[in-house]
Image (cartoon, helix red, strand yellow):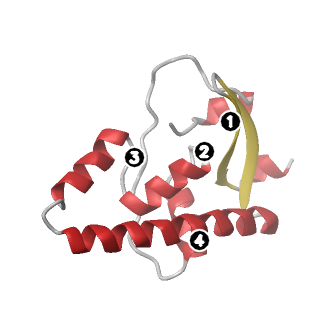
């Protein structure tokens, strides 16, 4: 689940069950541009790597039931499913690399966040506040 600004600033996930919304983005020919577009459209949120991948790959807020709905809608088109699975696998590697590159360039901010499952790294578009 994406983090809010308050959770990002505090460095810990809130105990509340509130859900932060995610805005989908269109298609891009470059993973770095796709990543920046996704984080720009969702500048008030921070995401773990898995959430970024689901957000850019499925174009929704990455709730498991939504992903299941997407996959169920195309069950009759097995060739398309196989192609999408391969594309998703390639996208995962590309997004991992793009996140690391953008973070190294200073375009994406990273922060370790305390959750009930331990510490996880979250990403969001770099802001002036993050540079301080």
Left or right, residue 5 beside residue 51: right
Mark 4 or 3, nearer chain start: 3
* Quarter of the figure with residue 120: top right
Decide: few, some or many residues near mark 2? Use Cα within 10 Å; few <14, some 14-19, many ≥20: many
Decide: few, some or many residues near mark 1? Use Cα within 10 Å; few <14, some 14-19, many ≥20: many
Left or right, residue 121 beside residue 46: right
Residue shown at the point (64%, 63%) measured from the top left: 96
- The residue at the far top in this view is 15
Determine which residue is flagged by label 1: 8
Determine which residue is flagged by label 3: 61
Q: CA distance from mark 4 to mark 3?
A: 20 Å
Q: Nearer the viewer, mark 4 or mark 3?
A: 4
Residue shown at the point (59%, 71%) measured from the top left: 94
Determine which residue is flagged by label 4: 94
Q: Nearer the viewer, residue 36 or 119?
A: 119
Q: Nearer the viewer, residue 80 or 57?
A: 80
Question: Which label sits on residue 46?
Answer: 2
Mark 2 or 1, nearer chain start: 1
Q: CA distance from mark 2 to mark 1?
A: 7 Å
Q: Nearer the viewer, mark 3 or mark 1?
A: 3
Q: CA distance from mark 3 to mark 1?
A: 18 Å
Q: Is residue 9 above or below residue 18?
A: below
Q: Which type of secondary structure does the marked residue at label 2 adopt?
A: loop
């Amino acid at each position: 689940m994406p983090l809010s600004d308050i959770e990002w600033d505090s460095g810990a996930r809130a105990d509340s069950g509130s859900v932060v919304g995610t805005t989908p983005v269109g298609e891009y020919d470059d993973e770095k541009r796709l990543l920046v577009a996704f984080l720009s459209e969702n500048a008030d949120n921070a995401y773990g790597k898995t959430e970024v991948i689901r957000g850019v790959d499925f174009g929704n807020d990455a709730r498991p039931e939504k992903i299941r709905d997407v996959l169920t809608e195309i069950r009759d088109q097995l060739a398309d499913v196989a192609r999408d699975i391969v594309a998703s696998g390639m996208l995962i590697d590309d997004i991992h690399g793009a996140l690391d590159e953008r973070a190294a360039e200073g375009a994406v901010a990273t922060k370790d966040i305390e959750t009930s499952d331990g510490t996880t790294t979250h990403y969001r578009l770099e802001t002036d506040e993050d540079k301080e």
